[in-house]
Image (cartoon, rainbow, N blue to C red):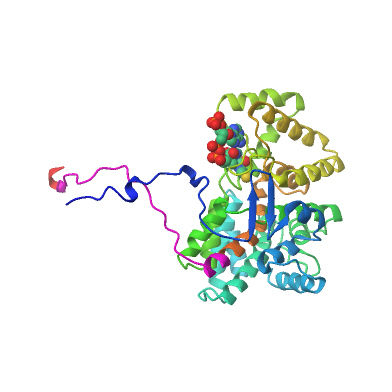
């Protein structure tokens, strides 16, 4: 038998698919050269400075336009109405081992939501849109409910009169958040909502490209987001911050890490060659919240890490770095940070999954084969 060695076996391998253009999309654009980010053509700085809530951003991502006042209030109601989760899924979360990571429980719970969704087997655009809205609404409730289960508290129903950001904090802590706390959570949600063809979004699109259902694609994305090189970085940032008790320790701590070839979590990015544009907004919010809570030291340590890493490696903090201290100030425990990321990125995932279904071609790249051919096959009795 002759073997064709001229085709995909000899293709050029692009490690980590860096620079490979794998989809066309008008949802968001990461401008790595200039350090800019656009959602549907709007610069992230304008979005961060001017939107009234994350819900506006969800409307923009799913409907391509910023909502009018009436559209926003209708859309908010549409989402709030869908925030409740089936009691069976709550019961399932209750029996998960207390040591299980919240991201693992969330992944399993989202997968289980499919069993109770009236549209699971319908892959029409309308059904997928409805499922997408339900997931955008339900993931925040799953996350907050799991937190309360873990703390032995009864879970709270979402308040229909407040938006997603306020509801997350309300369902976590059992009291209505202040304006500043709500603004901080809104900022986290709207800054994490979408980010080009990041790893979890790409993973979601791969699953959707096989015509698997919305819940399957989102479950895939959750598994991918968990990794410390992606959404799991924010949890590691807080672990690192907890090990440094004073600004004076920063230089030595970071120098030791780098000399051991370790990565400083919350730094570096595949696409941005300048500072991640989301960082400035979270840095500012982190400083304000830390000082209001009398925890200025935490901010100072963070800032000193930033200066030191830049001096030594020339790399900038990414969105995960100050998201950690903002979430800490909001009373979210570190093992839940990535679930909050997921509670936001679900809107981008849904937009991309719908986009993939509309313009689908199976995503199926090829690999460069480095193995042998035509090895002699010995029957088991002769090996
Ligand atoms: N700490 C220390 N060095 C880092 C670094 C970090 N966080 N991120 C990148 N680098 C260095 C690498 O060591 C490498 O240096 P070298 O050329 O001297 O070997 C160089 O920067 C390029 O890194 P590379 O691994 O090729 O970049 P990548 O595009 O494959 O990886 C990340 C991108 C995000 C995975 C990487 O920056 C990282 O691991 N960051 C920490 C995890 C994190 O914060 N993830 C969230 C991303 S939003």
State the quadrant of the C terminus. Answer: top left
How far from the left and from the top, in percent, is residue 292? 87, 43
Q: Main secondary structure of the magenta part?
A: loop
How far from the left and from the top, in percent, is residue 351? 61, 64
Identify the residue at horizontal 27%, vertical 47% (top origin): 5
Camera sees residue 97: no
How far from the left and from the top, in percent, is residue 287? 82, 40
**Front one among 37 and 373:** 37
Identify whether 117 is placed above or below 252. Answer: below
1 lies left or right of 174: left
Identify the residue at horizontal 76%, vertical 48% (top origin): 331
Q: Residue furthest left?
A: 382
**Which quarter of the frame holds ligand 1?**
top right
- Does the magenta run of residues contain 60? no
206 lies left or right of 164: left
- Over which residues does the magenta segment extend? 354-380
Q: Quadrant of residue 166?
A: bottom right
Identify whether 49 is placed above or below 86. Answer: above
Identify whether 245 is placed above or below 276. Answer: above
Identify the residue at horizontal 29%, vertical 48% (top origin): 6
Camera sees residue 128: yes
Q: Quadrant of residue 162?
A: bottom right
How far from the left and from the top, in percent, is residue 231? 61, 48
Identify whether 244 is placed above or below 93. Answer: above
Instruction: Please give the count of numbered marks on the rendered protein.
Output: 0
- Does the magenta run of residues contain 374? yes
**Front one among 8 and 220:** 8
Identify the residue at horizontal 32%, vertical 51% (top origin): 7
């Amino acid at each position: 038998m002759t073997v064709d060695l001229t085709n995909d076996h000899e293709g050029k391998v692009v490690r980590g698919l860096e620079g490979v253009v794998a989809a066309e999309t008008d949802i968001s654009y990461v401008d790595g050269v200039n350090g800019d980010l656009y959602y549907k053509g709007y610069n992230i700085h304008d979005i961060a400075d001017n939107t009234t809530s994350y819900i506006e951003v969800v409307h923009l991502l799913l409907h391509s336009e910023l909502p009018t006042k009436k559209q926003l209030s209708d859309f908010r109601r549409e989402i709030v109405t869908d925030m409740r989760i089936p009691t069976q899924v709550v019961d399932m979360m209750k029996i998960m081992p207390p040591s299980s990571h919240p991201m693992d429980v969330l992944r399993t719970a989202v997968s289980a939501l499919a069993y109770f969704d009236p549209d699971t087997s319908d892959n029409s655009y309308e059904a997928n849109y409805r499922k997408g809205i339900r997931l955008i609404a339900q993931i925040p409730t799953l996350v907050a409910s799991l937190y309360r289960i873990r703390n032995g508290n009864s879970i709270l129903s979402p308040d229909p009169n407040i938006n997603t950001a306020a509801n997350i904090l309300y369902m976590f802590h059992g009291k209505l958040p202040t304006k500043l706390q709500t603004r901080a959570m809104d900022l986290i949600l709207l800054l994490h909502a979408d980010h080009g063809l990041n790893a979890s979004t790409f993973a979601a699109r791969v699953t959707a490209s096989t015509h698997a259902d919305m819940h399957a694609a989102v479950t895939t994305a959750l598994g991918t987001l968990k990794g410390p090189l992606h959404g799991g970085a924010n949890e590691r940032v807080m672990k690192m911050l907890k090990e440094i008790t004073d600004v004076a320790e920063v230089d030595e701590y970071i120098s030791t890490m780098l000399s051991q070839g370790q990565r400083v979590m919350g730094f570096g990015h595949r696409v941005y060659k300048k500072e991640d544009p989301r960082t400035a907004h979270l840095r500012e919010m982190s400083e304000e919240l830390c000082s209001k809570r009398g925890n200025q030291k935490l901010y100072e340590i963070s800032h000193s890490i930033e200066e030191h890493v830049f001096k030594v490696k020339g790399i900038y903090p990414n969105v995960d770095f100050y998201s950690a201290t903002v979430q800490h100030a909001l009373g979210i425990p570190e093992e839940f940070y990535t679930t909050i990321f997921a509670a936001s990125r679900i809107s981008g995932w849904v937009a991309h999954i719908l986009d993939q279904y509309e313009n689908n071609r199976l995503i199926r790249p090829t690999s460069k084969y480095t193995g042998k051919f035509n090895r002699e096959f010995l029957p088991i009795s002769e090996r």
